[in-house]
Amino acid sequence: MEMTNKMPKLWNPAAESMDRGELAELQLDKLKRQLIRVYEQSPYYTAKFDKAGVDPAKLKSFADYQHFPFFDKDEERESQEDSKRQQGHPLGLHITCDIRQVNRLSSSSGTTGAPTFSGFTKADRDVTAENMARALVRIGIEPGDMVMHASVMSMWIAGLPILDAMLDYGACVIPVGALSGVERVAQIGVETHPKLIACTVSFAQHIVKTMKERTGVDPADLGIEKLVVFGEPGGSIPEIYKPIEAAFGGATVYDLMGATGCHSPTGIACEAHAGIHYFAEDNAHFEICDPETMQSLPLEDGVEGEIVYTGLDKECAPLIRWRDKDIIQVTMSPCECGRPGPRMTFKGRVDDMLLVRGVNVFPNAVRDVINKVSELTTGNMRIVKPGPEPVVPPPVPIKVEIQAGVPEERRRALADDLITAIRNHLRFRAEIEFIEEGQFELIKGTTGKTKLVEEAG
């Protein structure tokens, strides 16, 4: 891609290009008002803050904010179970608005437990629409452009909510959905020639691998110029996005990210593929915390740690200092594309981390190593652990999907190469089992996300 010094178009330049000093003042002002609001309107937050010994009225700086308690998925689930029993709704005792102001519910997939719910008021949906507009403008989508929504048509935040936001922006949305299959995507794509398709990374890979064989339609002939992918790691990994781009005839893949408890989306990659530009700091504040001490780290180039979110403008049940359990590396230096904002690179998940003889292992790091060793692998893999605990004794069983037709002798050599690369880069011993291409189930639950870890059984 040819880069220029010209500033790319932005939806809201005043907010997206704000001086960092001015941004910090705005964030602190919004934070003070949000903390006072939830403390006064929610008995749940009143008790939570009192127990932690913090007073929102005395907040003077972000350093003071370090003393405020975190929120996590277990606490959210407990709060929502209590609200179902006590108040008859599933939004949690930490709700901070009249329940009748809530006009949309979203939910998690529930793949690791009971689903959790997020409520949105009209004001909340307006901020979500604002953020979606910021994302679409950054990648060159204009009102009236045809956009195929090939994510699952569900309550998942990247399902119907993202479709609603694209409609609010003025895009001509084609709601195909993922569960209708590649046949329907091919049929509608041939008729409509959308400019963009939005889906999970794994469904984009599924289209690449199966569409031509199943339908006779080559993805490159659909005329798609852009793919927005989300929901799982991969959209920023060259070994994954480059084959997708090539299969779609040179289209560009853009990795989209959200922030739990805020107004997703909050960031999108650019053509340089140099991290995801976080464009929502004015309404979705984030911290990078040391995973062991949970102390907030200075926001500087290269800082890495667990990301913690606070929805500055969230009206219904904002999550204060929400631990999303993602490990993120932040780049603060300017991007060659010219777009403003910090850039984020996903490194792994705290709750997906495995322990192999005292060594911390992130599954996506294993996938990265595998993808770099040979083009004969497809990008799909599973680490097999013996049970629910994160401890996995070596040799660690890893299922790796391999392209069809690779002879046995070449497979044995490739297995040795993978074992050596994993030992050299990640310091543990692996045991490789090859899975024939197409044998991994790509669609999981209601979100279309794929898993990188499975339990033996």
Image (cartoon, rainbow, N blue to C red):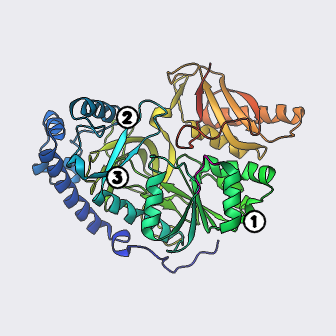
Q: What residue type is labelled 3?
A: Cys
The quadrant of the picture occupied by the C terminus is top right
Residue 262: mark in rendering? 3
- Measured as percent of width and height from the top left, residue 64 is found at 19, 48
User: Which residue range is magenta in the image?
Assistant: 176-180
Q: Is residue 157 above or below residue 109?
A: below
Q: What residue type is labelled 1?
A: Asp
Give the mark nearer the N terminus: 2 vs 1: 1
Residue 153: mark in rendering? none
Task: Report the residue marked by disc 1.
Answer: 221
Does the magenta stretch mainly form a helix, a strand or a loop? loop
- Measured as percent of width and height from the top left, residue 360 is found at 52, 31
Task: Report the residue marked by disc 2.
Answer: 292
Q: How far apart are marks 3 and 1 (CA)?
A: 38 Å
Circle 1 packing at 10 Å, graded few (<14), some (14-19), many (20+), is some
Apparent side of residue 423 relative to residue 129 in the rendered image (left or right): right
Q: What element carries label 1?
A: helix
> At 64% across and 71% down in the image, what residue appears?
1
